[in-house]
């Protein structure tokens, strides 16, 4: 592992701190709450500070429990005035989640910016337009190729899977730190020392391995053609057709299902037995099944066969 | 990718020859029964290792519909029967289904002593605030001012908070949920079933035909909807919207304490005596 990383270190072409850093160097780190955005920015900030730079870091946090969007601006240089990075001025954009990365792309320098993005996809609840299971989601459909055409240097790295293979998916942010280390002029021992000082003691081994993995991955991506990049599109969807099985003999016409169906797709028929009158509106949410005190309703979600085969 | 796991089918756990059940249209007890069976299904409890004991009343009848070892006992005494059963057969999961009158009035004495002993049992009390089966008499949990056949001018007795009673008596696990939230009820019952001690779970159920009709509470669906406005998750007990919530009804896990379990203590004492 060590040998490999040395090779990587010798062949990499680090982004020089622009003109001995007359201007501050801007790194924008974005992701979803709980992924470790703040940890990445802390590592970077403390590294830059140890290097004698003035560092300003500003972040939005507290979203960890909510799965909300989290970003952290890290600026370092001989003198830093503004704590935030203006649009189009980030030298490096590190994204821990695919859609968050795309959301912040306008902040990246178009000509020289480096975009490092985890292909991990976390679909936010409000991107789900329907309660129907497997319904289309309003999630970005851009592929890695399309994005790499927009920026000068882009890496779509499957960091979460790499970390999972190491045994701890929470180390995905350190995989990205490893990737980041290839574009900044800090020495490898400095990086490793800082990373180990920030991770919990029990996870030092896995995080060191994750760091190496990310670092080597970028080195390989630089030599290999970009077709190597994982080009995953939006999460695969399977369509389901909800079907209600109503046991007529058990129904007592209490109308709970009729009145409480969020889509108003049930009605009592002439015999006052619950019937699904608008099957096209049914989302299969199972509320009627759960609330039926007489166990008369059973919701089946039949997978549409072609979609299921396509998903396989 | 969304993957559809085979969803729990309650009918697998019912004695189908007994269906449809005898409960009135819109009765909340059916939803509570579903939650119990769902919890048992998710915990993969072997039905041969499950004993359901119930007393008398609408809730007491539920055991008859469960396809497992069931025991329909005398009024107010399901906890006493279950105590004997759980002591003799510690390998069984003993679940008691009881109602508010069964558990708090006739069986109130058994409840406090079951809480005090902390024997491993799960007690599911379905509280519909009334004696529904016998014609709608006032029960220990009937809210004040409510009309029943024995309080034709409105109930003037203060009512019990069953969970507070169980906590005070020392129950190991106390929780409360409304029937409207079936999956949450299932989760609560699962916690109760896994608790190594006496678990008391109060389920607030609706009596639509007797209580609801007499008190003009609307149709069964309106009663289910009312549960939402009258409940408050325990997590929000001290929240800023407190003044805007009129009724004080915290739900969820209300108490959990690790007192020694009675059955294990008794067996240990017996073993120590035998070793002498």
Image: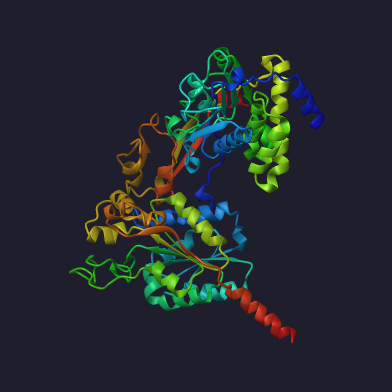
Quadrant of residue B84 in the image? bottom right
Name the quarter where the N terminus of chain B is drawn: top right
Query: In the figure, B271 relative to A97: above or below?
Result: below
Between A35 and B58, the residue placed more toward the observer is: A35
Answer whether residue A226 is visible to the viewer in this image. Answer: yes
Location of the C terminus of chain B (image quadrant): bottom right
Picture layout, residue A46 above or below residue B52: above
Residue A128 is situated, as x and y percent measured from the top left of the image, at 45, 31
Residue B152, image x and y in percent?
19, 69
Residue A231 lies, with reference to residue B71, above or below; the image says above
Q: Is residue A227 left or right of residue B217?
A: right
**Left or right: B196 with respect to B158?**
right
Q: Is residue B251 above or below residue B222?
A: below
Q: Position of residue B75 (x, y in %)?
A: 42, 74
Which residue, as the protein is rendered here, is positioned at the far right?
A: A3
Where's residue A126, x and y in %? 43, 32
Seen from the viewer's position, the closer of residues B271 and A188 is A188
Q: Quadrant of residue B147?
A: bottom left
- In this rendering, position of residue B161 left or right of residue A14: left
Total tally of numbered discs in the picture: 0
Which residue is at the far bottom?
B276
Identified at 28% across, 61% down, the residue is B210
Residue at x-position 61% and y-position 66%? B92
Instruction: Say if residue A1 shows up in the picture.
Output: no
Looking at the picture, tell me which residue is in the foreground, A108 or B168: A108
Residue extending farthest left: B153
Q: Nearer the viewer, residue B156 or A304?
A: B156
């Amino acid at each position: 592992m060590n040998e490999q990383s040395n090779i990587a270190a010798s062949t990499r072409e680090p982004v020089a701190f622009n003109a001995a850093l007359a201007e501050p160097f801007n790194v924008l780190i974005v992701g979803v709450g709980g992924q470790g955005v703040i940890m990445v920015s802390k590592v970077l900030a403390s590294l830059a500070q140890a290097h004698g730079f003035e560092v300003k870091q500003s972040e939005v946090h507290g979203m960890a429990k909510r799965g909300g969007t989290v970003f952290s601006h890290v600026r370092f240089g001989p003198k830093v005035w503004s704590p935030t990075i203006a649009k189009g001025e980030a030298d490096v954009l590190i994204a821990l989640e695919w859609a968050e990365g795309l959301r912040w792309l306008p902040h990246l320098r178009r000509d020289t910016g480096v975009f490092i993005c985890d292909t991990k996809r976390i679909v936010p609840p409000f991107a789900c337009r329907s309660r129907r299971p497997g319904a289309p989601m309003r999630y970005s459909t851009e592929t890695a190729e399309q994005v790499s055409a927009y920026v000068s240097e882009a890496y779509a790295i499957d960091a979460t899977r790499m970390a999972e293979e190491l045994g701890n998916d929470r180390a995905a942010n350190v995989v990205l730190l490893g990737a980041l280390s290839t574009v900044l002029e800090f020495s490898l021992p400095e990086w490793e020392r800082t990373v180990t000082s920030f991770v919990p003691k029990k996870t030092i081994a896995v995080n060191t391995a994750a760091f190496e993995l990310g670092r080597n991955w970028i080195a390989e991506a630089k030599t290999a053609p970009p077709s190597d990049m994982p080009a995953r599109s939006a999460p695969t969807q399977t369509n389901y057709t909800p079907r209600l099985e109503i046991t007529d003999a058990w129904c007592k016409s209490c109308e709970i299902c009729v009145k409480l169906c969020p889509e108003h797709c049930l009605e009592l028929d002439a015999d006052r037995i619950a019937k699904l009158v608008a099957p096209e509106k049914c989302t299969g949410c199972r509320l009627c099944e759960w609330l039926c005190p007489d166990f008369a309703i059973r919701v089946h979600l039949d997978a549409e066969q072609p979609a299921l085969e396509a998903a396989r | 990718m969304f993957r559809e796991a085979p969803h729990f089918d309650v009918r697998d756990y019912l004695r189908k020859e007994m269906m449809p059940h005898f409960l009135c249209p819109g009765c909340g007890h059916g939803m509570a029964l579903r939650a119990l069976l769902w919890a048992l299904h998710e915990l993969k409890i072997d039905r041969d290792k499950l004993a359901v004991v119930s007393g008398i009343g609408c809730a007491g009848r539920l055991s008859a519909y469960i396809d497992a070892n069931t025991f329909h006992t005398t009024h107010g005494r399901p906890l006493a029967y279950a105590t004997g059963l759980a002591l003799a057969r510690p390998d069984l999961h003993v679940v008691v289904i009881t109602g508010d009158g069964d558990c708090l009035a006739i069986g109130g004495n058994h409840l406090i002593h079951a809480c005090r002993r902390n024997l491993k049992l799960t007690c599911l009390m379905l509280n519909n605030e009334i004696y529904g089966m016998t014609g709608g008499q006032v029960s220990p949990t009937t809210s004040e001012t409510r009309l029943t056949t024995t309080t034709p001018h409105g109930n003037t007795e203060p009512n019990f908070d069953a969970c507070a009673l169980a906590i005070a008596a020392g129950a190991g696990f106390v929780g409360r949920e409304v029937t409207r939230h079936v999956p949450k009820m299932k989760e609560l019952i699962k916690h109760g079933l896994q608790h190594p001690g006496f678990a008391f779970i109060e389920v607030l159920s609706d009596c639509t035909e007797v209580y609801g009709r007499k008190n003009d509470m609307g149709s069964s669906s309106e009663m289910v909807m009312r549960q939402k406005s009258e409940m408050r998750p325990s997590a929000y007990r001290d929240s800023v919207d407190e003044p805007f919530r009129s009724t004080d009804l915290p739900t969820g896990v209300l108490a959990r304490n690790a007192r020694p379990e009675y059955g294990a203590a008794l067996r240990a004492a017996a073993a120590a005596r035998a070793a002498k």
